[in-house]
Image (cartoon, rainbow, N blue to C red):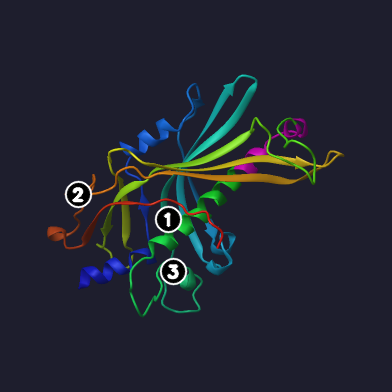
Amino acid sequence: MKQLSFLFIFMFFITLSLPQFVNAQEDCVAMNTPPGANCGSWVTHGVTVIGNQLHSSFGLCNIYVSYQSRTCTITEGECTRTFEQFQLGTIDWSWDEDPLSPCYYFTQYLMPGYPDDFAGIDKNQFEKFLGKLMPHLMDVHFMNYFQSLSDIERLAIKCDGSNPNCEMPTCAPYEASYISSSCKDICYNFENPDHPVLTFGDCNATPQGCCILTATYCPCFDSTPAYSGIIKELNLTVNQGGCAGNGPLYGTCYYGTGGEDSIYEPCQTICPNIEEW
């Protein structure tokens, strides 16, 4: 019962990690990187996201996120574009049973019934959270990219048409993609019951399924031309492939004496949900 109780509270203060970006994870990145792309090294980022930047119901909760990205360029005919690829690293936030604490309602969203009824994490809610988090991180990177450009460079990548009739150009100047294997196993580490740790492994499923969330951007100008805003299109591609049985964390998911402080979860599908809610 003690282990089950800990399982129900693992998301209160959580860390998600991608082990070394190997196997299925690398497969999905390779399969979704255009041939001929010139890509830089992966760079690790750490940011604090305020909950209400993602959704009003998340309040002022500080959500700490680490992730990796790399920047690529590719030329296809007369079209040269920049795209960034993202992989999620860690997420954690403070938890407190006081309804007045900043993260109380955010934690309750992920775990309905908290703190009185530990009914377990709601997978659907977690996927919706990822569907808000990843586009937010992509927005930040696009704005950093956009602000680094000169006025002439900004006009060179603008949307087709002008405000209020801006449309995404045929040659999209900037794209960002969260790329992940869609089949993962999970290890819950409860060595420290006040700071549970969730580790994801990437299952070598057959066939391999991938989850790709892509955001395409272009700046919109009026006829002056003066900058008037950003056009963004989101597209989610999910190929779940096979997903069953045990994954790479099986047999290694042990902490403490005899593995008493860990729980293993077999392979399951996890992918952002970008539906409006």
Residue 91 is labelled as: 1
Query: Does the rendering let one see residue 193?
Result: no
Displayed quadrant of residue 265: bottom left
CB of mark 1 within 8 Å of CB of mark 3? no
Residue at 51% x, 40% y is 177
Q: Tell me: 273 left or right of 122.
A: right
Up-down: is 8 above or below 144? below
Q: Earlier in the sequence, mark 1 or mark 3?
A: 1
Question: Looking at the image, which is closer to me, 175 or 92?
Answer: 175
Residue that label 3 marks = 107
Q: Amino acid at mark 3?
A: Thr
Residue at 41% x, 31% y is 31
Up-down: is 43 above or below 140? above
- Please state the horizontal and vertical placement of residue 150, each as a whole percent of the image: 74, 33
In front of the other: label 1 or label 2?
2
- Please state the horizontal and vertical placement of residue 253, each as a whole percent of the image: 21, 53
What's the distance in space between the residues labelled 1 and 2, CA to CA? Answer: 22 Å
In front of the other: label 1 or label 3?
3
Up-down: is 111 above or below 82? below
Q: Amino acid at mark 2?
A: Tyr
Q: Earlier in the sequence, mark 1 or mark 2?
A: 1
Direction left: furthest residue: 258
What's the distance in space between the residues labelled 1 and 3, CA to CA? Answer: 13 Å
| Range shown magenta | 142-155
- Please state the horizontal and vertical placement of residue 164, each as a whole percent of the image: 79, 46
Q: Give the class, few, some or many, for how many residues have Cα within 10 Å of label 2's Cα (few <14, many ≥20).
A: some
Question: Looking at the image, which is closer to me, 184 or 87?
Answer: 184
The stretch drawn in magenta includes residue 147: yes
Residue that label 2 marks = 250
Q: Quadrant of the N terminus?
A: bottom left
